[in-house]
Amino acid sequence: MIRYGCLVMYVVFMFMKNIQEYINQKELDPRLSFQKQMRLVYERPKAFMRGCIDVSGSAIGIHHDQPIPDGPVLYVHPRLRPADLLLLAGHLEEPAGFIAGEKAFRMPFLGNWLRLMGVICDGDSQDAVFQEAEVRLQKGQSLILSEDGKINPEELALRFDLPIVPVSTSGTDQLLRGRLLKRLKPADIELHIKPAYYPAGQKRLRA
C-alpha cells in the first residue's frame, strides 16, 4: 500500500514537473530529422516509465542476444499489458511507438504527451489504427505491438518488408496486486529481446 501511494505521488510529481518540458518539445527545430525529434520527445517519457517500475523496488533483468536491425522494426509481445508496455517502452534503446487506449488520450496533459510521441489511439477503427501505424513506419519509427491487438504484426511486416523482434516479459503480473486496495509489490522482472526475423523471407521459404 505504501509503495502504491509512492507510485501515485511519483506520477503526479512527474506530470507537474514536465509541463514546461512539454511546451519546449512542441517547439522542436523542424530541421532535425524525425528520428532525432523522437529521441528528444521520448527522453523524459522513457525516464518516467522506468521510474514507475523502479518505485516498486523490483529487480529487472534484460536479456538481449543480438543487435536490433537498423531502421524501423516491430517489437511483438504475446499479450501486452500496461506493465509490460512500461517495461518495454522505457528500456528499449531507440524510441518505439505503441497503441494506447482512448481513455489515456482524454486525460489532461497525458493525452497531449501521447500525441506528441506519435502514440496511436486504440479507440479508432481497425483500418484507422492500421493506417496510422503505416504512417509511423514510413517516417522511420519502430512500433511495439501485441499479438492479440488490433494490428496483425505479420501482415504489417509483410507489407513493408520489416523485421519482427519477438519480446517476452515475466514478473510484471506480480507488480500490482489487490482489487479494492491496490498494493505495489517488488518482483523479479525479466525482459527477453529475441533475434529478429523477416516474415517475408519465411513466406518465400514456405513457398
Image (spheres, rainbow, N blue to C red):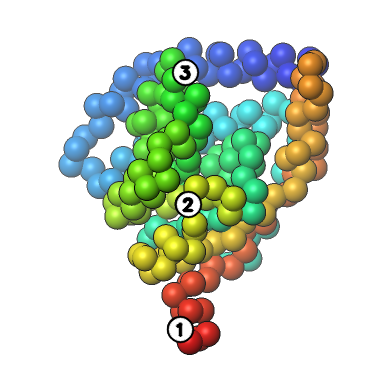
Disc 1 crowd, CA 10 A, few/some/many (<14, 14-19, 20+): few
Say which label, 3 or 1, has the lower sequence index.
Answer: 3
First reached walking from the N terminus: tag 2 or tag 1 = 2
Residue picked out by circle 1: 204
* Label 2 sits on residue: 151
Q: CA distance from mark 3 to mark 2?
A: 24 Å
Amino acid bearing label 1:
Arg
Please give the name of the residue rendered at 23% of the width and 43% of the height, measured from the top-left corner: 32
At x 37%, y 38%, the residue is 118
Image: 58 above or below 20: below
Image location (x, y in percent) of residue 121: 42, 35
Crowd around label 3: few <14 · some 14–19 · many ≥20 (10 Å): few
Q: Classify residue 58 by image quadrant.
A: top right
The span from disc 2 to disc 1 (Cα, nearest Å) is: 22 Å
Q: Is residue 87 visible?
A: no
Q: As shown in the figure, which amino acid type bears the numbered disc 3?
A: Met
Is any part of residue 16 visible from this angle?
yes
In the rendered image, the vertical position of residue 67 relative to residue 92, given as above or below: below
Q: Residue 69 at what x, y percent from top left?
A: 45, 65
* Circle nearer the viewer, 3 or 2: 2
Q: What's under tag 2, amino acid-wise?
A: Ile
Question: In the image, is 154 to the left or to the right of 82?
Answer: left
In-front residue for pair 31/200: 200
Q: Secondary structure at mark 2?
A: loop
In the image, what residue occupies the spot 67% across and 32% down?
53
